[in-house]
Amino acid sequence: EMDVQVRRVLQIPMWSQRVIYLQGSALKDQDLLRAKMDDAEACFILSSRCEVDRTSSDHQTILRAWAVKDFAPNCPLYVQILKPENKFHIKFADHVVCEEEFKYAMLALNCICPATSTLITLLVHTSRGQEGQQSPEQWQKIYGRCSGNEVYHIVLEESTFFAEYEGKSFTYASFHAHKKFGVCLIGVRREDNKNILLNPGPRYIMNATDICFYINITKEENSAFKNQDQQKKSNVPRSFYHGPSRLPVHSIIASMGTVAIDLQDTSCRSTSGPTLSLPTEGSKEIRRPSIAPVLEVADTSSIQTCDLLSDQSEDETTADEETSSNLEYAKGYPPYSPYIGSSPTFCHLLHEKVPFCCLRLDKSCQHNYYEDAKAYGFKNKLIIVAAETAGNGLYNFIVPLRAYYRPKKELNPIVLLLDNPPDMHFLDAICWFPMVYYMVGSIDNLDDLLRCGVTFAANMVVVDKESTMSAEEDYMADAKTIVNVQTLFRLFSSLSIITELTHPANMRFMQFRAKDCYSLALSKLEKKEREKGSNLAFMFRLPFAAGRVFSISMLDTLLYQSFVKDYMISITRLLLGLDTTPGSGFLCSMKITEDDLWIRTYARLYQKLCSSTGDVPIGIYRTESQKLTTSESQISIS
């Protein structure tokens, strides 16, 4: 039987005339015949994610996929699977989204590229960028408009945006297309090749038959440009970047393409606002030189690149004192994968695997006598993951954080805080990675938190527990997680907590303050956007905008978008580091400090990155601290 929400939607005239609801089973040929499956343009098979036994749910999905393939072998299949180990049973499907793969990779990147989950969510949602346009606050207008950006594609020779860049480098094409039309070229695919390359760099020369992937408010075919108005028609007006606006919230993200850039708080904000402004007259003698032009064809001597098969990463060629520590790590493909179908990723690895006893953070053994995180004396801050079990999907949290292109000196130790002990197969997979540990404990136990190093952590990721995903009362599945995270928020105020929830509607309870007038105002804004029919109504909630909360259901639209954009899953997997392609770029972040304020605008930043390193910026993450009243200040532990 259809549930109440579906019944309510189908009562709306617009949908009642477009949707036919049939009750039946995919395993019965007569039901497939009733649905005209043999004549369908596509078949979407969705898993029930709120089941206590997610493996059983996957098994049912697999049988449905087999039944449809047997009945209608020519019907394109779009399948949602929950656990990565079950993917290889449905390799024949045209498009597959594995929830746990995407979830863990996204949570991992949130730790090093702030608000990656928000960036990806906004990119895969369809929106006209109208959200927040009636708001009196500038940040909501900018953020809402930029949320309308999506990924589109076009053949180069058929494009007004890119045709003139045939024979030019990719970096040159990306910069000048952004300067001229406001679009962000992020990737290409050769006509005779199935592999998409994200930012292949300045050595890549554009061909007439290349398929270009770009980010814009609307696709080029729906755009109307006049030569004299090209600047005015850009998807993000220039005034958005150097206007006198002030952002009165702690975090926002504008989704515009492959790098999340962190704009740090600076002392000059109080007078000049959150803009990249010029230095004062007195500092002219220390002003940096002007930005170099972006070359049509790469000058190989001036571009820094990272070779996939090189034995040296970008941070190994300098400091002599690092020579000894560099010997500890090698580069290669992990020798053991916890499940069939895992994409091989070039990573930082140890020369010899760590004994299982040494992986346990809180237990001494014959090799070391450490019993808590403090004793290890880590140079970099920790990343702690609190999960119920060490499922195969958790492997995809570790891999992006140990990928070969991450500088060795910036690798954060990873501590897995698990409710249940991991099995031997999982330990076999993680024992080759440097600085990865586990501990059996719970986030609702303060001793366990202190022992695993919560006071030395940069980020704590709280993963949704399978055992609580279903509850008798709707939306109560997240109750324990929310209260535990609120406790962490109150006790460890400087800790960055990233939480996965079952229901997106519950994000309003994250970092909850009962007397916070600003949150109440955002609640009203959310209701207005929902009444207008926005499917991104939750986007203005501060925890979501800041990348502090994520729900896998937000990515449901990724599978649906693949029907009209068959490349979206591939691009998202490349961005998240789930897949790697030789010659393709990767997602990273850079911090803009006070010393960089001379750059002034996003357009000049685009030029600087393209001309110096060949990087393509695709978004900004802007931060401003909120002033808390005494009654709302957090409790801290010394």
Image (tube, helix red, strand yellow):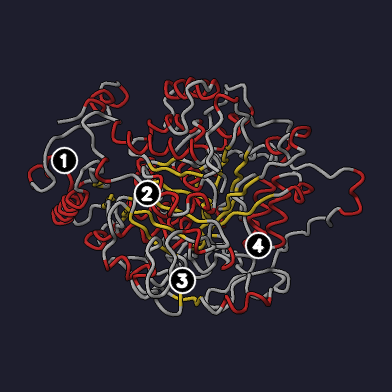
Mark 4 closeness class: few <14, some 14–19, many ≥20 residues within 10 Å: many
> Of 245 and 402, which appears nearest the observer?
402
Quadrant for the N terminus, please.
Answer: top left
Q: What amino acid type is highlighted by mark number 1?
A: Ala
x, y (%) of residue 446? 41, 45
Depth-wise, is mark 3 or mark 1 nearer the camera?
3
Structural distance between the alpha carbons of marks 2 and 1: 22 Å
**In this rendering, would 395 be left or right of 328?**
left
Mark 2 closeness class: few <14, some 14–19, many ≥20 residues within 10 Å: some
For label 4, the residue is 614
Structural distance between the alpha carbons of marks 4 and 3: 21 Å
x, y (%) of residue 251? 58, 37
Q: First in sequence: mark 4 or mark 2?
A: 2
For label 3, the residue is 346
Depth-wise, is mark 2 or mark 1 nearer the camera?
2
Q: What amino acid type is highlighted by mark number 2?
A: Ser
x, y (%) of residue 606? 68, 52
Q: First in sequence: mark 3 or mark 2?
A: 3
Q: First in sequence: mark 2 or mark 1?
A: 1
Q: What amino acid type is highlighted by mark number 4?
A: Gly
Q: Tag 4, which secondary structure?
A: loop
Depth-wise, is mark 3 or mark 2 nearer the camera?
3
Name the residue: 67% across, 37% down: 237
Name the residue: 59% across, 70% down: 306
For label 1, the residue is 35
Quadrant for the C terminus, please.
Answer: top right
Structural distance between the alpha carbons of marks 3 and 1: 45 Å
Q: Give above or below for 30 relative to 21.
A: below
